[in-house]
Image (cartoon, grey):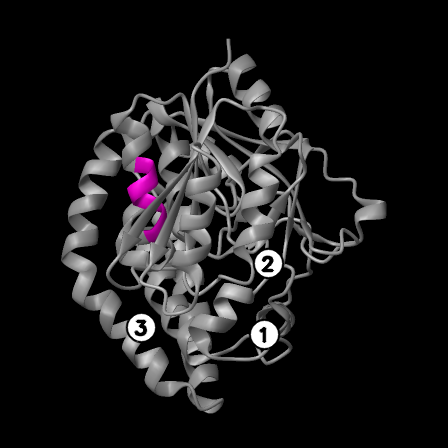
Amino acid sequence: MQKKIIIIIPNWNGAIDLPASIDSILAQTYTHFSLVVVDNGSTDDSRAVIEAYMQRDNRVEGIFLDKNYGYTGGVNPGLKQAIEQKAAYAAPFNNDARADKHWLEHLVAFLDAHPTYGIATCTFLHSDGKTIDSTGDLYTVWGLSFPRGRDQPTAVHTQHTLDIFGASGGATLYRVSMLEKIGIFDEDFFAYYEDIDLSFRAQLNGWKVAYVESAVAYHERGKTSNRLANRKAGDSAATPFLTEQFMKNLPYIIVKDVPAGLLWHVLPRFAFAYVLFFWRAVSDGRGMSACKGTLLFWCKLPKKLAQRRTIQKHRTVSNDYIWGLFVHDLPPHAGKLRVLRASWWRLIGRRAA
């Protein structure tokens, strides 16, 4: 007997993308699911699109919010519903993504067979299928995360590792019993890195995260981000909106999730990188956004410290275990930080490993 699943598509002004996303979910070979489309106060034709699907298929439900609550606020109503209805699993799915018809079947089969795993993520490819968007998320000793395998050719994909640090929120299956213990997305994140935070909390609570290679989905990366940032495809990724979210959200993870015994390893590196990012934003004309993001972080710091006490109190794994999950290097894209680090190593006479 198939277990009940709730799939959640958060949407904001994505009427043009929704049909392909919804159709790919309704075509899944695993059929015992409800699809909840949460609309974040869209001003385009999104509501009409959602209501048309609701009339056509009784598995589709719409939740219509009064304004844009971001990715976190767009997914959490569906996660709450999954918890209330005692569903086995819940799966956030991007409105600019498409799932292979076996996507859900493979993820469910894995979690059914592996009760110690709370999260299973997929091979998330770019829309043309030629390159990788993500095969899971990694977290570094610098307090920086990055999507594993991004932009690598699919044809030479070799990242078959099962255990990973975290999972992209764009096409991932979560065990609902885990969410009941560790909580759902932190809505203070609004957008970006909320999935890293949730994966970190899962790891701290003893739940493993898996990459399931056979589960495949396709992502039109950046479409929703472009709308939020009011930019065109191909424009620079360093927008004011993204800068604000970056400067606000990355420190949240440090404060909430990094165990005290590891802070002395991570915090100095992160502080150096954070200051560098701040001044780069200032020099690029994004200083106001960097200041706003930093200010929002400091305003929320007391709340995050309170959350930290709860998270760390319920931690069930050792510092060594968490340390072993980290990548002991900079993210692949951190070119300027690598140059500065190499200069420092030359200054002190150290050789790079």
Question: Between 295 and 13, which is closer to the camera in this rendering?
Answer: 13
- Residue 232 vertical placement versus 260 (above, below): below
Tag of residue 331 = 2
Residue type pointed to by label 2: Pro
Which of label 2 and label 3 is nearer to you?
Answer: 3
Residue type pointed to by label 1: Leu
Question: Between 305 and 156, which is closer to the camera in this rendering?
Answer: 156
N-term mark: 3 or 1: 3
* Residue 93 image position (x, y, % from top left): 50, 45
Residue located beneath label 3 in the image: 293
At mark 1, the secondary structure is helix
* Residue 235 image position (x, y, % from top left): 60, 80
Residue at 56 percent across and 54 percent down: it is 146
> Magenta segment, which residues?
74-79
**Residue 136 visible:** no
Question: Between 38 and 156, which is closer to the camera in this rendering?
Answer: 38
The residues tagged by marks 2 and 1 sit, at their Cα atoms, a distance apart of 14 Å
* Residue 157 image position (x, y, % from top left): 79, 44
At mark 2, the secondary structure is loop
In the shown orientation, is residue 352 left or right of residue 238?
right
Which of label 3 and label 1 is nearer to you?
Answer: 3
Q: Are marks 2 and 3 in contact (CB under 8 Å)?
A: no
Query: Dominant secondary structure of the magenta stretch?
Result: helix
Residue type pointed to by label 3: Gly
Tag of residue 340 = 1
At mark 3, the secondary structure is helix
Which of label 2 and label 1 is nearer to you?
Answer: 2
- Residue 243 vertical placement versus 170 (above, below): below
Residue at 30 percent across and 80 percent down: it is 291
Tell me the quarter of the picture where residue 192 sits.
Answer: bottom left
- Residue 272 vertical placement versus 260 (above, below): below
Label 3 crowd (10 A; few <14 / some 14-19 / many >=20): many
